[in-house]
Image (tube, helix red, strand yellow):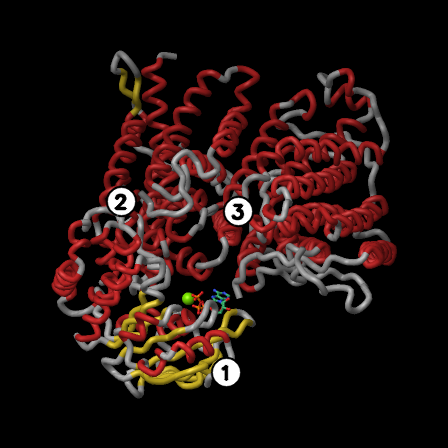
Amino acid sequence: MLELDRVSTGYGRVRALDTVSLTLGAGHTLAVLGPNGAGKSTLLKLVAGLQAPWSGTLKLDGSADLSPLDVTARVHRGIVLCPEGRRIFTTLSVEENLCIGGTALLARPGGAQRMREGLERAYSLFPILAERRHGPGSALSGGQQQMLAIARALMAEPRLLLLDEPSLGLSPVMADEVYATLAALKAEGMTLIVVEEAAGRPLGLADTAMILRNGRTVWRGAAAAARDPDLLQRAYLGDHAA
Amino acid sequence: MRRPLQLRSDAPLTPGGYMSLVASGMGIAALLALAILGLNLATGARFASLLTNLGLWLIIAVGFQVFVGSTGTISFGHPAFVALGAYTGGILTLPPAMQRIALPDLPGWLAGLDPGLWPATIAGGAVAALLALLIGPIVMRLTGIAAGIMTFGLLVIVNEMIRAATPLTRGNATFYGVPRLAGLTEVLVVVVLVVGIALAYKFSRWGLRARSVAQDPVAAEMSGISVVTSRLWAFVLSAFICGIGGALMGFFLTAFSAQSFYVGMVLPMMIMVLLGGMNSVAGALTGAVLLTFWEYVMRLIETGGMGISLPPGLSQLTLGAGLIAILFFRPSGLWGSREFFIAPVGQTRKGDNP
Amino acid sequence: MNLLQLGVDGLATGSVYMMLALGISLVFSVMRLVNFAYGMIIVWFGFMLHVLWGTGLPYWLCVLGALAGTVLLSIVLARAIFMPFVGAPPATLLLASFGVAIVLQSVAVVLFGEPARPVQTPQILLTSIDTGWFRISVLQLLSLALGLTMLVGLEFLIGRTRIGMEIRATAESPEVARLMAVRSDRVLTFVFALSGLIAGLVALVWFAQSGSVTARGDLAPTLKAFVAVVIGGLGTIRGAVLGGLVLGFLETAMSGLLVGALSGFQQTFVFALVILILLLRPEGLLGKATGGMR
Ligand SMILES: Nc1ncnc2c1ncn2[C@@H]1O[C@H](COP(=O)(O)OP(=O)(O)OP(=O)(O)O)[C@@H](O)[C@H]1O
Ligand SMILES: [Mg+2]
């Protein structure tokens, strides 16, 4: 579904990703792990179109080159990013947040109908959002905001959902709840890339995993194999593992 | 492209480097001044008034740059300082006979002082600096948009005050009869001095503080630098230089009105500083030279002096369009934050932000 | 002067200033641009009305034409100049709009020269009604009606419609809105069109009062708008309303109070008040740095 071939990028003169490659099949889940500043968010921004590659290629569905597509066009192709720190619209109501999330639908046939269906699905997935639908986004708790952020991303009917640290700042219970939702999405056949700093939950969810450090891939393989604490420690601290 | 108008603080230098920096900056300003003088001689003083005008703009642009460059804040208010300089210098030096005609209601203690060129010029700068010192503590709290709007307000207020203070300024009428105390040579001497002052400030502890505040106010505050105070000194010094420029302008023009120092003056000042690079004294000089020349050519064209005749308003049009183009294509100006100084290799650009 | 009269005059003037502030604030909310060229857009409405009137068309058609022209001008400026600057720091945007103002002004000078041009106003607008308690002109009534309609209309548009929602989302966070496939260029174009329409409507009242337009007449409306938004707080409807009304009442009260030698200091007093407000509340009375235009 998604293929990155030796992609590098950065900010100004600072290189944030160095010749990173990955392939992700449809319906699969990839966990991207690594310490602060490893380039995890940069990788997602690159796929979402917020960040242009310096070199290397990005391909969607085997052939289509992603580089010429801007963020909006990628949303229309089904690539949706749920950004780090949730970034919900605090001045909009919960329902308005969802409606903004569904903007891409409006350009398609039957858009209004699909928007209604999307809202219904969001509310059945997260009943708490239905209760708060007319309240402002700012009135939600951290966990509820994360749910809203995921629900908002789902409104665009993604095929490939990119999640940047979805459990950041959540209580363990809340984090488990978020990952239960992600597991349900995976079961529906959605392709996911989950970025986290802590390895536990994403590795339980993912099929494959990669570990980044200083913009380089230090390890890549089956998610199950990454659960070796020794490997993780070496990868994070830098005593070579690859 | 379209990077923010960001500030780069050049390397803090060793004391020796600091002195050689200021001296070489002044040296180059002196070369520029000599070139202008030479040009004046070579053309038989046919362009004396254009060249003097250029000198005055050099002073004002450097004064403006001191503020903009060290605080990263734009100001629409600086023509007010130029105005204060011009009026102060004019009032002080008006010959007694002229004072009785032009300013019959002048308060007695201001009448008949006649301190001469240099004291009157300094007084012009001092009055401008005093105003900056009074309002600075308020205005310097603000940055960005709010500062822009407030300095614009300052311009309006000072303009209104000048118009209303008829006994001192003749109100809306033209202020005339100022003796022509300054010519090309005097102006150019001041240019060299002012460049020295600006560079000495820029690389002094106070200048570096102001620039570090501009770069990162929070970090500066945390390392014990007072945001308001450090910006205030840049504001006061800048007002002082602009006031001096204003006084000299008055001595050169001999007649002016409140309208001469109003919104219309903002545009050339802004372009001079932005074109050359708002972080650079060298940039301000370059900008003033280019713009003065350009306005001269445009005025020639508009008055039909070059065989073609274009409607008035066109030169203003080129300036407005030019401002937009600079902001879009080269927001850091021609020079960026570079200065033209000669310093031993390795002594500049090492170390970094304080 | 009786208080009731002062209240009526203040409200009518305040209504005009509120509209001015709304036009500036709307654009600021979505792209952090304080539009210095706003006053020139108003001036251009005056010139368009002047030119259209010269063709002999009926007054209402001239007004419609000039309104359409103003909206178009605002859109063209947005797409050709302002939108390429999206993402630049606010100070750069402010300066760029200063450049735009200069360009618009010099084009006006080239086309129409410096002297004032008459702007036609139907006599009916200038008649005034004496209710016994206070006097009110038809023009003042029109200002009040326009202001009220605009307020209700904007509240509805921003608060209840799809485009309003997109405007609020863009105002709060342009990057995230873009991530959600919100077409920010369309949102911005729409907002500039709206701001142009508001400018045109204010201009109608503005020039009916003065009866003529000059190429350098942009300073007054721009100043009023700036002061109003600074008082109330930039980027919100409430701020624009409050700032406009406060400024309107203030000026009305001062023109009654400041007589003789003091009458030349009206702007000075206004700005002194603005400074005081900014000292106490740097974001304006109702200001908040970001947030969605409500
Ligand atoms: N907008 C930016 N401008 C400049 N440098 C940036 C920017 N965003 C990230 N970087 C740099 O790029 C590198 C990678 O950043 P990135 O945000 O991708 O890391 P991350 O793995 O997501 O870290 P975290 O766990 O803290 O979210 C870092 O060195 C960071 O400092
Ligand atoms: Mg990150």
Q: Amino acid at mark 1?
A: His
Q: Determine which residue is flagged by label 2.
A: C61
Give whichever of C234, A200 is nearer the camera: A200
Q: Determine which residue is flagged by label 1.
A: A240
Q: Indicate which label's residue lies in the foreground, 1 or 2.
A: 1
Q: Based on the displayed image, in which of its 4 quarters is residue C249 positioned?
A: top left
Q: Indicate which label's residue lies in the foreground, 3 or 1.
A: 1
Task: Indicate the position of residue B133 as horizontal and vertical percent values.
Answer: 67, 33
The image shows residue C294, relative to residue A6, as above or below, that is: above
Decide: few, some or many residues near mark 1? Use Cα within 10 Å; few <14, some 14-19, many ≥20: few
Instruction: Give the quadrant of the N terminus of chain A.
Output: bottom left
Q: Based on the displayed image, in which of its 4 quarters is residue C208 positioned?
A: top left
Q: Determine which residue is flagged by label 3.
A: B144
Task: Indicate the position of residue C94 as horizontal and vertical percent values.
Answer: 50, 49
Residue A9 visible? The answer is: no
Residue depicted at 79% across the width and 52% down the height: B47
- Give the chain of mark 1: A
Residue depicted at 19% across the width and 54% down the height: A129
Task: Indicate the position of residue A70 as horizontal and vertical percent values.
Answer: 36, 72
Could you tell me which secondary element the residue under label 2 belongs to? helix
The image shows residue B157, relative to residue B352, as above or below, that is: above
Q: Indicate which label's residue lies in the foreground, 2 or 3.
A: 3
Give whichever of A33, C166 is nearer the camera: A33
Residue C194 lies left or right of residue B351; in this view the side is left
Q: Amino acid at mark 2?
A: Leu
Residue depicted at 67% across the width and 30% down the height: B174
